[in-house]
């Protein structure tokens, strides 16, 4: 019997005991959670410009404000796109094994269930030296599947240090004696750690001793799907989207989105001249007075220059006529 489970906060019909269901885990929920960050960054860029009205900020601040606006728009659009359009799965649990599409250098790494020697839950602490302020990053309750070093070297290892990235052996494939722990991060794909480990463990116990079989072509059905998805309605499909759909907004999520939006509207309307503070009105008046004074000064200077030029020309003409008589 199917029972509701949470996938990124959205209930889907997933039966943990049905090991023939293929589960797909995506980063959509994680990416969708970047929306408040994008909106806040956009607000900061607009706020910098609003603070300097009616003038422009200093060159460095202007560059930073433009960068914040562009980054904020980019993050917001990306997060909204991931909220309404699914990406590719990074973890897939099928009756054949664990499929990992974590590295951009490979389409997929595959671990058959019979190659897994054990399953564990660990905490990972990594010194994040690439950040502006280096610090420890903590990943708690990470599900790991243990494989032999021989299997890892033959099937999972990537020789290129550039393609592996700086934290390959600290967060993804962690050595433990003569074994390698292959990490599956639940927090990245928007599911509870216990749910991910339970799904892995029940399939390992069911298929861990089975010999390799040809990989079947299994069509996909998303249990957590948008209404009107005709492809998802096709019968006989066994793939379940677990953690693939971003969760609905909670009250706190709504606050984190609404507050930057209010700030963006306020700052944007201020920049558009719909409303202004008393200080901005006074600054505009002073700037207009200075512009008028400067324009009057330039006009009078040009008139004086023209008058002096005319006097010089008249004097030159008079001198020419006086000396040409003799």
Image (spheres, rainbow, N blue to C red):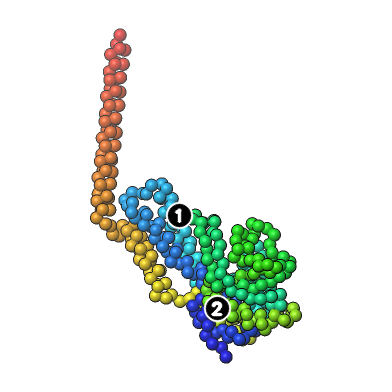
Q: Is mark 2 on a helix, strand or loop?
A: helix
Task: In the displayed orientation, state which residue is furthest to the front.
Answer: 177
Relative to 217, residue 102 above or below: above
Residue 245 visible, this angle: no
State which quarter of the image contains the N terminus: bottom right
Relative to 289, residue 138 above or below: below
Number of the label disc, if any, that sits on residue 185? none
Report the side of 223 relative to 110 (left or right). left
Q: Which residue is drawn at 30% across and 26% down?
A: 309
Please state the horizontal and vertical placement of residue 110, each as a whole percent of the image. Answer: 68, 72
Number of the label disc, if any, that sits on residue 67? 1
Please state the horizontal and vertical placement of residue 302, each as a whole percent of the image. Answer: 29, 33
Relative to 134, residue 1 above or below: below
Report the side of 258 relative to 31 (left or right). left
Please state the horizontal and vertical placement of residue 294, each as a whole percent of the image. Answer: 28, 40
Relative to 227, residue 159 above or below: above
- Image depth: mark 2 or mark 1 in front: 2
Q: Which residue is drawn at 35% across and 63% down?
A: 263
The residue nearer to you, when weighing 123 against 16, is 123
Report the side of 45 relative to 87 (left or right). left
Q: Mark 2 points at which residue?
A: 194
Q: Which residue is drawn at 53% across and 83% down?
A: 5
Q: What element carries label 1?
A: helix
Q: How crowded is mark 1: few (under 14 residues within 10 Å), some or many (20 or more)?
A: some
Q: Within the image, what quadrant is residue 256 found in? A: bottom left
Quick check: marks 2 and 1 in contact, CB under 8 Å? Answer: no
Count how many numbered circles sit on residues in the image.
Answer: 2
Distance of mark 2 from mark 1, alpha carbons?
A: 40 Å
State which quarter of the image contains the C terminus: top left
Which tag, 2 or 1, sits closer to the chain's start?
Answer: 1
Task: In the displayed orientation, state which residue is furthest to the bottom.
Answer: 1
The residue nearer to you, when weighing 125 against 108, is 125
């Amino acid at each position: 019997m199917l029972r509701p489970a949470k996938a990124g906060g959205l209930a889907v019909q997933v039966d943990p005991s049905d090991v023939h269901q293929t589960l797909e885990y995506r980063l959509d929920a994680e990416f969708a959670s970047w929306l408040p960050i994008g909106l806040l960054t956009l607000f900061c860029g607009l706020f910098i410009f609003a603070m300097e009205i009616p003038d422009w900020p200093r060159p460095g601040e202007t560059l930073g404000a433009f960068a914040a606006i562009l980054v904020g728009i980019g993050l917001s659009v990306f997060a909204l796109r991931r909220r309404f359009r699914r990406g590719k799965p990074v973890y897939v649990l099928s009756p054949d094994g664990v499929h990992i599409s974590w590295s951009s250098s490979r389409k997929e790494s595959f671990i058959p269930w019979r190659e897994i020697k054990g399953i564990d839950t660990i905490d990972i602490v990594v010194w994040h030296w690439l950040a502006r302020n280096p610090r420890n990053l903590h990943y708690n309750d990470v599900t790991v599947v243990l494989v032999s070093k021989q299997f890892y070297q033959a099937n999972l290892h990537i020789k290129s240090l550039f393609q592996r990235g700086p934290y390959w052996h600290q967060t993804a494939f962690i050595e433990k004696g003569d074994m390698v722990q292959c990490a599956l991060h639940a927090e990245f794909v928007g599911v509870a750690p216990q749910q991910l480990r339970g799904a892995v463990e029940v399939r390992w116990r069911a298929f861990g001793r089975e010999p390799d079989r040809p990989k079947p072509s299994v069509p996909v059905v998303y249990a957590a799907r948008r209404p009107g998805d005709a492809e998802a309605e096709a019968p006989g499909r066994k793939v379940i989207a677990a953690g693939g759909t971003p969760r609905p907004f909670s009250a706190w999520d709504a606050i984190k989105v609404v507050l930057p939006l209010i700030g963006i509207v306020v700052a944007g309307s201020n920049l558009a001249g719909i409303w202004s503070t008393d200080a901005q009105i006074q600054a505009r008046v002073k700037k207009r007075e200075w512009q008028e004074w400067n324009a009057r000064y330039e006009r009078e200077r040009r008139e004086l220059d023209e008058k002096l030029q005319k006097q010089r020309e008249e004097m030159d003409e008079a001198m020419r006529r006086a000396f040409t008589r003799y």
